[in-house]
Image (cartoon, grey):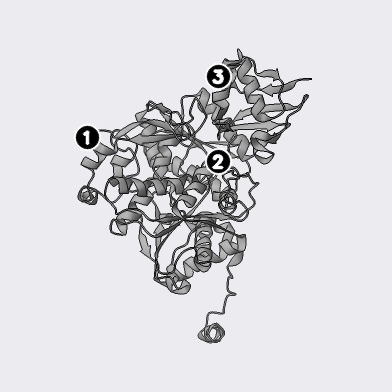
Amino acid sequence: MAIKVRIPTPLQKLTNGQSEVECSATNVLELVDALEKDYPGMKERLSDGGKIRRFINIYVNEEDIRFANKEETAIKDGDNVSIVPAIAGGREQYL
Amino acid sequence: MIMKTYVKSLRCVECGREYKIEPIYVCEFCFGPLEVTYDYERIKLDMTRQKIESRPHNMWRYRELLPIDGDPVTGFDTGYTPLMRARNLARAWGVREIYLKDDSVNHPTLSFKDRVVAVAVTKAKEFGFDTVACASTGNLANSVAAQSARAGMKRFIFTPADLELSKTINSLVYHPNLVMVDGNYDEVNRLCSEVANKYHWAFVNINIRPFYGEGSKSLGFEVAEQLGWKTPHNIVVPNASGSLMTKIWKSFKELEKLGLVPPVKTRVFAAQATGCNPIVTAIKEDSDVIKPVKPRTIAKSLAIGNPADGYYAARVTKDTGGYGEDSTDQEIVDAMKLLAETEGVFAETAGGVTVSAAKKLVESGRISKDETLVICITGNGLKTTEAIVDHLLRPAPIRPNIEAFEELLKKLQ
């Protein structure tokens, strides 16, 4: 069972309109490289100099990688990964 | 009279990509926030101290540094609030010089939000919007309701349905379209993002946000001008989203760039409530990641658990040699009372948060007692009376005769 990755609307033009794709990787950085291989252009949208961009949230099985192991956060087959731009609706910070 | 504009572009704070001036707020490439950029070279030629000083006493005296093209449509009496010398508070704390920047009397709705809304409403009109909107429970809603009414624009205020009656009244009186949403604040905001996308409305803190945010700079400009064209050694600012503090810092740096103040050495300090302190926590832990929290504090105007500008706010304190402090509900109330008793200023809970933080920072030595300290008071206490009502003792009535009074007087002395 591969890893399921949810792709946010603004990035779906890079994945031929798909909102969910599959790939293999053992950690977040590897996942970014794997996505780049299948969908060129993804890497520079998600990361900069080996670090995930500040306004991109990545969740591995609902956990924000910032509070796990960041780019080194482990991923295994069957895990669910979500990529969510930080501005995606419902931001209580708009006060 | 059409004023030439000094605004250059919108630029992503994270990746630097530039965009034309439009009602957009997010970088298409990296999803970072967009910020207004200016042609400082041209501004330097046109903006002198004398010119500023000759203008009316309102926020628009710094108009070259505010992101509008033509004349403002609102905010004609907004800003230029008092910078009060707080001698009693200073004496109580053993500090040489304390000033209060008193936005609790800002016009028209008694909070610093009148500044950002004045810019937002003006810019919305410039963009051709006929409807202004926001999601807010407090100061922002009041200001949008009032200023858009005066500017003759259609207006929609979105709030959670369980908002206290007193807060609802403070906006309802201006006759906006009030949309009460059966949901929590997160859900209200999510709805507003969708509405903003679908309808051509100016949501002041969503699609107009980069312009709106710039209005806060006027507070910083005024502090510098009112101190005699200098920036203070120390300034303490309450943090909700973190935006105000970053903009005050920006304002000082812009004045420095234009040669209007000497080199800026200000230390900037963040104030939050202990019940909602994600920015102060990041500062104290020297972390560049903001951990969202669930707010639980009487300081509702600062109750943002996931602050949009949190990272940048924490950076400002770090870069300037500042710090941050947070306070419990009791400390907040005590500070509100201290401010009122020493300086005659009735601040809302955010003001208590800021005064309490300043007290702690002075006591811990982070703020030197020999330096100038400015404390930002961002809203009026009449807006948050529920926070203080149980902490004030109402005296028992006396009979209407002088003997009864004199007996009371003996007890009071």
Q: Residues within 10 Å of mark 3 (few under 14, many from 20)?
A: some
The residue positioned 52% from the left and 61% from the top of the image is B357
Label 1 sits on what residue type? Met
- In the rendered image, residue B381, in percent from the top left (x then y), is placed at 50, 58
Q: Is residue B163 left or right of residue B119?
A: right
Chain name for mark 1: B
Looking at the rendered structure, the secondary structure element under dot 1 is: loop
Rendered image quadrant of residue B343: bottom left
- In the rendered image, residue A85, in percent from the top left (x then y), is placed at 58, 29
- In the rendered image, residue B365, in percent from the top left (x then y), is placed at 50, 66
**Number of the label disc, if any, that sits on residue B301:** none
User: Foreground: B75 or B366?
Assistant: B366
Label 3 sits on what residue type? Gly
Q: Which residue is label 1 attached to?
A: B1
Label 2 sits on what residue type? Gln
Which tag is nearer the camera, tag 1 or tag 2?
2
The residue positioned 35% from the left and 58% from the top of the image is B82
Instruction: Name the image quarter holding the N terminus of chain A.
Output: top right
Instruction: Give the mark nearer the N terminus: 3 vs 2.
Output: 3
Q: Is residue B413 left or right of residue B296?
A: left
Rendered image quadrant of residue B174: top left
Residue A7 visible, this orientation: no
Looking at the rendered structure, the secondary structure element under dot 2 is: loop
In the image, are marks 1 and 3 on the same chain?
Answer: no
Chain name for mark 2: A
User: Foreground: B345 or B312?
Assistant: B312
Q: Which residue is label 2 attached to?
A: A93
Q: Which residue is label 3 attached to?
A: A41
**Distance in Å between CA atoms under marks 3 and 2:** 30 Å
Q: Residues within 10 Å of mark 2 (few under 14, many from 20)?
A: many
Chain name for mark 3: A
Judge whether B395 appears above or below B60 on screen. Answer: below
